Image (tube, rainbow, N blue to C red):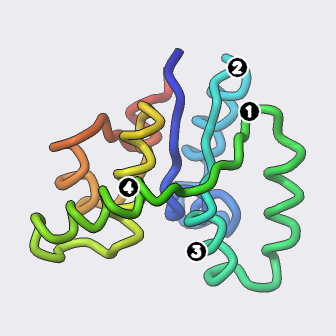
């Protein structure tokens, strides 16, 4: 079964109804949920969403808790170690949180879903990484 880990930017597309992307994101998430796929949401994503959405964060948490296809996960010390190793060998071209997204996706053996070009460029060296529009049938 294919499972997904969505980068914070994808959730922001949806929750903030950003540009034309939110409808694509909504379609992808609906498709994943109807096919009973799991979408992982990490504590790192929650932290980023908390910072970037501020007053709406309580509603976002409620949304996640109500969705059967969403599985909340915690980062492990191994995730942090792997991300630090990537950060060192990649010469700091991404944020540490982006390296954590890669580490989590690798550990969970799932597809990292993002639109961040630099993250895609780096992540594809280690894991499968796609944009939502590439996953809609």
Earlier-in-chain disc, 1 versus 4 = 1
Q: Residue at x 66, y 66 (%)?
A: 46
Left or right placement of residue 121 versus residue 99 in this view: left
Picture disc at residue 115: 4
Q: Are marks 2 and 1 in contact (CB under 8 Å)?
A: yes
Q: Residue at x 55, y 44 (%)?
A: 24
Label 2: how many Cα within 10 Å (few below 14, some 14–19, many 20+): some
Q: CA distance from mark 3 to mark 2?
A: 26 Å
Q: Secondary structure at mark 3?
A: helix
Q: Nearer the viewer, mark 3 or mark 4?
A: 3
Q: Secondary structure at mark 1?
A: loop
Label 3: how many Cα within 10 Å (few below 14, some 14–19, many 20+): some
Q: Secondary structure at mark 4?
A: loop
Read off the residue under disc 3.
48
Earlier-in-chain disc, 2 versus 4 = 2
Label 4: how many Cα within 10 Å (few below 14, some 14–19, many 20+): many
Picture disc at residue 36: 2
């Amino acid at each position: 079964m294919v499972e997904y880990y969505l980068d914070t930017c994808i959730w922001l597309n949806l929750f903030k109804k950003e540009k034309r992307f939110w409808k694509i994101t909504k379609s992808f998430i609906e498709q994943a949920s109807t096919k009973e796929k799991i979408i992982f949401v990490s504590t790192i994503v929650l932290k980023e969403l908390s910072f970037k959405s501020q007053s709406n964060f309580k509603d976002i948490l409620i949304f996640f808790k109500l969705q059967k296809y969403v599985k909340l996960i915690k980062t492990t010390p191994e995730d942090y170690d792997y991300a630090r190793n990537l950060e060192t060998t990649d010469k700091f071209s991404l944020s540490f949180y982006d390296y954590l997204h890669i580490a989590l996706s690798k550990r969970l053996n799932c597809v990292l879903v993002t639109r961040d070009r630099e993250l895609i460029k780096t992540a594809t060296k280690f894991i499968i990484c796609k944009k939502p529009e590439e996953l809609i049938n």
